[in-house]
Amino acid sequence: MTEKNEIIRFEGVHKWFGEFHVLRDINLSVYEGERIVICGPSGSGKSTLIRCINRLEEHQRGSIVVDGIELNHTIKNIEKIRAEVGMVFQQFNLFPHLTILENLTVGPIWVRKTPRKEAEATARDYLERVRIAHQATKYPGQLSGGQQQRAAIARSLCMKPKVMLFDEPTSSLDPEMVKEVLDVMIDLAEDGMTMLVVTHEMGFAKRVGDRVIFMDEGVIVEENKPALFFEHPSKPRTQEFLRQILEH
Amino acid sequence: MNQATDNRRATPRIRGWASNRQLLYQFLVIAAVTGFAYYLFSNAQANLNRQSIATGFGFLSQEAGFDIGETVVEYSAGDTYRRALIAGACNTLKVSFIGIILSVTIGTLVGMARISGNWLVSTLASAYVESLRNVPLLLQLFFLYALATDVFPHPREALSPITGVFLTNRGLYFGIPAMAPAYKFAGIAFLITLAALMPLRYWARRYRDNTGKILPINAISALLCIGVPLIVWILGGAPREMDVPELRGFNFRGGASISPEFGALLLGLVLYTSAFVAEVVRSGIESVNKGQTEAAVSLGLKRPHVLNLVVLPQAMRVIVPPLTNQMLNLTKNSSLAVGIGYPDFVSTANTTINQTGQAIEGVGLILALYLFFSLVTSFIMNWYNKRIALVER
């Protein structure tokens, strides 16, 4: 992996929510084309970690460098990074007053300054890829949860991002819709997209993950290749967590 | 049409509709209401006959014989009651129209200030809202009117905070540019520019669609609206003569003026209603899910674009219905003008009733006018609300 370019680098990052120390001394490097799965119990700081990458959360100590740009208070830099980093949310967050096609073109038109025809052609391509091409003129409220999440993924992809962040993308979906979203994510991974995925879908982690990161109480407890991580977790905290999510 | 018949067919027959007991109840209720209405009507008729007051709207064509302090339309005591009532209606319309524009503008600014991250700004906005909307409007009007008539000095000792502006207990007097043809032309130029903005904005959108380039169209529009009339004014010889009010005898002559009654009423209505509008705007913006803003900024959209493209369109559908209510409230509250002597419609109608004794017709006219204003406002706002409504599943 070392021959590849480093695209995200955390160095000694700390973050507090008031008194609550949510991230403690995070050091992490992500290389181009890597697929990283982040898991851990709720409140462990895994969502906060990826939300720091596009500055939806502000870190208070240490440094985060994304695509060669350091995240600080310069709004121009933050906007530049956000355009290069796609984000998929647990609650989809599609814009309910815009059609699916408009949801997908708003970024390219207003941020990338793409002519409308071109933006719409790209959008239709991505809708095809996430297999909802026929829903282009509908509104988000008219789609199922799984379709909405796939549209949300397509919306991020339309910006041609260098990195995609997924914040529990399947956690608010009905069980039968999880697969259709995971299939899209697997396609994306196989195309070589750099991905950071917060999820408890262990099947997904095993299949496409290059590294699994386990977090607890704001600390990266353990990171390893998926096979090793699931078969031979080294830390007792990891073993306990895996027992709880795998034993049903 | 088709749909209507379908709906009727689809509606199941209400069970028990044919029951005799229910039919009897319905009949009794209808009989009671009709009987009461007949009693009221015949009672009024008998009383009117006894006092030999003619019914009908014939009085509208008689000479009014009373003066109206300030009017928008031409009016003198020799005109008919009809003319007097129209003058009153125009006064109501004037204070409501200006009041609605000002209170929506100020209310929106205060509402946004209230959710500002700046502690001082949001605290000041909260204080504005809480103090103004919790004091009864009539009390505020009395206070403002007393301020205008008792505290401000006689015209002879007028306060002049700015050159050409005079505060007196007879009203606010200020200088305006003396009428010159250049102003008329500038005014026409302004209207033409305004009309030309629509095709211009359409062209700018087409240009963006085709090339992707985003023009600062709002800034350009604003610049044109100020610039074009200014150029016309300069070409027209740039007249700078002012018509400044001057103290002649007991009062000021010339310039423009705002009477204490109109000033107090407008200020009172605007302060009071804008506090409510601020709350409507604040709740509307806060109703938009935080995830929407996060998704928008995650795409790299700039703050103003996030607001214009994502937050406001969603906030508007929450804001518009209660905002319509506030507009209606302001219009109806303008009848509190009676309390401080501004000659609005209620005031002129009251005088008409007192002089002619046509109370039923007069009150009927008042009801009809306010109903008409309210329905027109509702109609426009409902049309707008439909246009921005969300498509749900």
Image (cartoon, coloured by chain):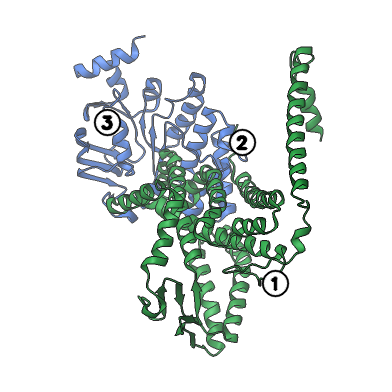
Residue B194 in the image, given as x and y percentages of width and height = 60, 69
* Mark sitting on residue B78: 1
- The image quadrant that residue B162 belongs to is bottom left
Separation (CA) of disc 1 from disc 3:
82 Å
Q: Is residue B116 above or below residue A133?
A: below
**Circle 1 sits in a helix, a strand or a loop, which is it?**
loop
Separation (CA) of disc 2 from disc 1:
70 Å
Residue A3 in the image, given as x and y percentages of width and height = 28, 42
What is the three-letter code of the residue carrying label 1? Gly
Residue A35 in the image, given as x and y percentages of width and height = 36, 33
Q: Chain of mark 3?
A: A
* Most foreground residue, A248 or A75: A75
Q: Chain of mark 2?
A: A
- The image quadrant that residue B41 belongs to is top right
Q: Which chain is green?
A: B
- Assign the C terminus of chain B to one quadrant of the image: top right
Display colour for chain A = blue
What is the three-letter code of the residue carrying label 3? Gly
- The image quadrant that residue B15 belongs to is top right
Using a 10 Å C-alpha cutoff, classify the residue at mark 1 as few (fewer than 14 neighbours), some (14 to 19) or many (20 or more). some
Q: Is residue A51 above or below residue A217?
A: below
Using a 10 Å C-alpha cutoff, classify the residue at mark 3 as few (fewer than 14 neighbours), some (14 to 19) or many (20 or more). many
Q: Mark yes or no: residue B194 visible.
A: yes
Q: Is residue B20 above or below residue B70?
A: above
Looking at the rendered structure, whether the residues under marks 2 and 3 are on a common chain is answered as yes
* Mark sitting on residue A45: 3
* Most foreground residue, A184 or B26: B26
Q: Which residue is mark 2?
A: A135
Residue lying farthest to the front in this orientation = B50
**Circle 2 sits in a helix, a strand or a loop, which is it?**
helix
